[in-house]
Image (cartoon, helix red, strand yellow):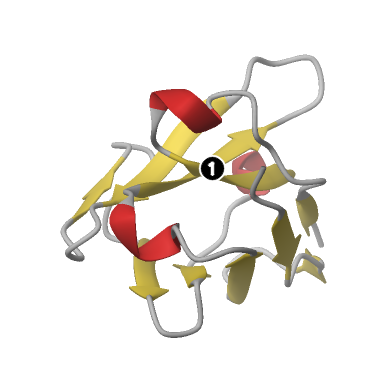
Amino acid sequence: QVQLVESGGALVQPGGSLRLSCAASGNVFWMYAMGWYRQAPGKARELVATITATGSPSYADSVKGRFTISRDNAQSTVYLQMNSLKPEDTAVYYCHIEATRFRSNWGQGTQVTVSS
């Protein structure tokens, strides 16, 4: 079992920025694609961004051009840089290992609230 620990969430004003981090335990991080998901109150969890093991990113249309996913395999950490934040970005953000064997493996999440 790999532990995922997300951090960096906060209350921020619209138009502001945050950088989320997710640290993974163990030594398998470098082998797998990683994803950032979010879940707003009363809504289903949705995929925000993914990054392959070799660093190729992809984004949901709702965050394209505003969010940037990156990874540091030496630190077993994946990041989500979020700029131009909007109230609709408010959610709990989770990272996830994009592999079938880890499909039930989630961290505790980190709360992002965008409000004036």
Left or right of 68 on screen, residue 75:
right
Residue at the spot 41% in from the left edge and 84% down from the top edge:
74
Looking at the picture, tell me which residue is in the foreground, 25 or 52. Answer: 25
User: Percent x, y for residue 110?
Assistant: 78, 55
Using the image as rendered, state which of residue 34 and residue 114 is in the foreground.
Answer: 34
Q: What percent of the width, then of the height, locates residue 64? A: 28, 50
Say which amino acid is labelled 1. Answer: His
Picture coordinates of residue 63, whole percent (x, y): 38, 48
Q: Is residue 101 left or right of residue 9?
A: left
Q: Is residue 53 above or below residue 78?
A: above
Asked if 87 appears above or below 98 in the picture, the reply is below
How many marks the image carries: the answer is 1
Residue at image point 50% right, 73% down: 76
Query: Which residue position is annotated with label 1?
Result: 96
Q: Quadrant of the N terminus?
A: top right
The one nearer the camera, 23 or 83, is: 23
Q: Residue at x 35, y 71 (%)?
A: 70
Along the line of sight, which residue is nearer the eye, 23 or 12? 23
Judge from the rendering whether residue 21 lies leftward or rightward of residue 34; answer left or right: right
Q: Quadrant of the C terminus?
A: bottom right
Asked if residue 17 shows in the view, the reply is yes
Q: Residues within 10 Å of mark 1 (few under 14, many from 20)?
A: many
Q: What residue is shown at x 38% (from left), y 38% (from top)?
A: 62
Q: Find numbered disc 1 in the image and state the secondary structure of the residue it sits on.
A: strand
* Image position of 66 (left or right of 96): left
Residue 51, position in %: x, y? 29, 54
